[in-house]
Amino acid sequence: MDVDAYNKLREEFMQVFEREEKADQVSASSDENALQLSSILNDGWARGTFW
């Protein structure tokens, strides 16, 4: 697997995913401090325990 190519696609996906999560929070009047899945996925990537 080409890690750089994968990371480029992952970053693109994460940008869209984060934007959708934020839009969903606004439309649902959710708690702004609610844990977001995108932050968990990004933390996993940073630690090397990614999906």
Image: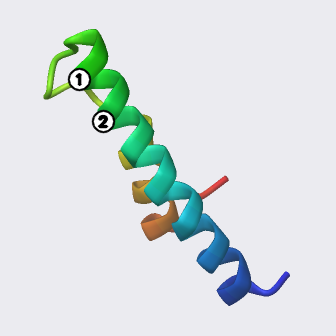
Instruction: Write down the quadrant of residue 22 in the picture.
Output: top left
Q: Is residue 36 left or right of residue 5?
A: left
Residue 22 horizontal side relative to residue 14, left or right: left
Disc 2 packing (10 Å; few <14; some 14–19; many ≥20): some
Mark 2 and mark 1 residues within 8 Å of each other at the beta carbon: yes
- Label 2: element kind: helix
How would you rate the neighbour count of disc 1 (Cα within 10 Å): few for under 14, some for 14-19, many for 20 or more? few
Nearer to us in this view, 21 or 50: 21
Q: Which residue is mark 1?
A: 26
**Picture coordinates of residue 44, whole percent (x, y):** 49, 56
Q: Amino acid at mark 2?
A: Lys
**As drawn, 51 above or below 48:** above
For the N terminus, the quadrant is bottom right
For image coordinates 40% across by 57% down, the residue present is 43
Residue 36 visible in the shown view? no
Tag of residue 22 = 2
- Left or right: 19, with 34 as reference point: right
Q: Secondary structure at mark 1?
A: helix
The image quadrant that residue 6 belongs to is bottom right
Q: Position of residue 39 (x, y in %)?
A: 36, 47
Residue 37 on image: x %, y %: 44, 36
Q: Nearer the viewer, residue 7 or 13?
A: 13
Residue 21 appears in the rendering:
yes
Q: On screen, 23 above or below 45?
A: above
Residue appearing at x 14%, y 28% in the figure: 33
| Kind of residue at badge 1 | Val
Q: Position of residue 25 (x, y in %)?
A: 28, 23
Q: CA distance from mark 2 to mark 1?
A: 6 Å
Which residue sits at x=72%, y=84%? 5
Relative to the observer, which residue lies in front, 29 or 36? 29
